[in-house]
Amino acid sequence: MASIRKLSRDRSKKGAPYYIQFLDHEGKRRTTKGCPDKGVTEAKAAKIETAVQRIKIGLADQSELDELLGKAQSDAWDEQIKAFEASLKRKNNTPKHVCLTVNRVKLVLTGSEFKSLADFDADEVEAFLTQHCQEEDLGHRTYNHYLQAVDSFGNWLSHPKRRILEKNPFAGIPRRNAETDVRHARRALSPEEIALVIQTAGNSTYSVQGYDGVTRARIYLLSYMTGLRKGEIASLTRANFKLDGEHPTLTVEAKHSKHRKKDTLPLHLDLVAEVRVWLTGLEVDQPLFPLLGKRKAYKMIQRDLEEAEIPYETEEGLADFHAAGRHTHITELLRSGVSLVQAKELARHSDVRMTMKYTHIGLEDQARAVNRLPSLPKADPVAPEKPADECLRIVCTSGGGTGQTRSVAVTERHSRSNARQRKNPRRGKGLDALGQPPSSAGTVRQKVEAAGIEPASCHFLSPFSSAGHILSPFDIAA
């Protein structure tokens, strides 16, 4: 049965249109736009319901329903995209994020050949994305970006406040493991390399992306000493710095931060002296590096690396602007002894696993870590070897009520036991087992209290020498 209703956001608007929801002849839930007049929309809903029934019994074909739906149904998802874009802008997303998300959604829906909201299908989206990424040679990470954009649009359509669709039609499409298909691996620079790049840029006479050498050197230094992203550096003005006080700080406003939170970071004392010079004569709201957000920073660092005779790309990855600054910053924090938790906070990551992705620890760092293990203490000289038969003997002690007695070798005990073996009265009756030898105290059995009996004890090899020193693994093996 067809139903009509207004969108949640339009309920208080008088001229807002009604929408019709119905099940077509294939059992798919579909939505089409009506008009602001409720009665007219109800009449249209009745005609749609009649057309569906006629198609089911064979009195009409799909064209009759398409004629009733018209252009409004075929372009329904296109109209919802506009509302979805407006919703993204209201949430204070960056223009770049809004543009990328909307364009990705349009590409997927158009490529999947969806005509209406009712045509949305997860399998069709997955098939298109797989083919598109193969044809364009796109990696798993890009695949996930497209899927994330479409999934967010599906969540928006099925949000309880809207209920344009009953559920997200794109939910459940599996993401791909981006770590198995890394297209742009990055590598961190060493402190010597980043220092050489800064010096090379500062002494250069050429301009890259509209910035002279001194300005580029300042950008590299600030990126390395703070770990800020390019967009965050581009947003800095004089008002973002507080250089007076015990702990000079730098503040990144929430609208310019990637995680949309206001961040306050401590500044290195060496950087504070440099920033004081940079801010001289600068207005309060004047950007420190104008138009940096629109510049291609990777071209800047690539040119200066070339002049410094440092490879831009190696087997480890690229040394682009993000790697030379932020990756190197986080890596050097950990190399200097900062804990992983502190590095996570300074990097402003929500998960420590993300911080680990920015850490580039090589074989040289691992070798230094292994060499920090404490050396083993020196062992005493190795004692002379004992005869083989002596090493095989197990020495035991016998206990009695009066205390500890002398130790007797096992071989001697067996010889004495055989010497005083008594006659077995059960011999000849099928019970020829030897009896227990009499006690060394005589024929009268000595009664000993249970508390005075000590269990037999065996002497095993001790890890301590006779002098009390710990034996090394090599001494024990000997």
Image: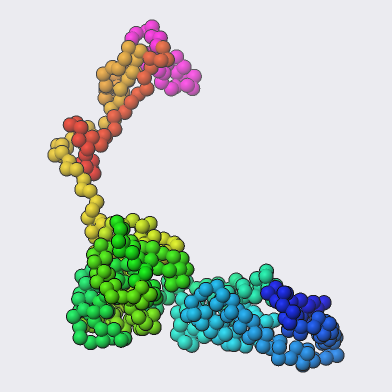
Position of the N terminus, as image quadrant, is: bottom right
Q: Is residue 370 something that shows in the picture?
A: yes
- 206, 163: nearer the viewer: 206
Q: Is residue 193 left or right of residue 127?
A: left
- 295, 149: nearer the viewer: 295
Residue at (22, 48) in percent of width and height: 374
Tell me if residue 186 comes above or below residue 204 in the rendering: above
Residue 244 part of the magenta segment:
no
Residue occupying the far top of the picture: 444
Give coordinates of residue 389: x percent, y percent. 22, 34
Tell me if residue 281 comes above or below residue 207 in the rendering: above
Tell me if residue 464 comes above or below residue 12 in the rendering: above
What span is colored magenta in the figure? 423-448
Magenta highlight: main SS: loop
Residue at (34, 15) in percent of width and height: 400
Q: Please identify the quarter of the rendering in which residue 338 is found.
A: bottom left
Residue at (62, 74) in percent of width and height: 156
- 323, 441: nearer the viewer: 323
Q: Is residue 22 left or right of residue 406?
A: right
Give coordinates of residue 21: x percent, y percent. 76, 78
Tell me if residue 465 comes above or below residue 224 in the rendering: above
Image mark count: 0
Give coordinates of residue 390: x percent, y percent. 22, 32
Position of the C terminus, as image quadrant, is: top left
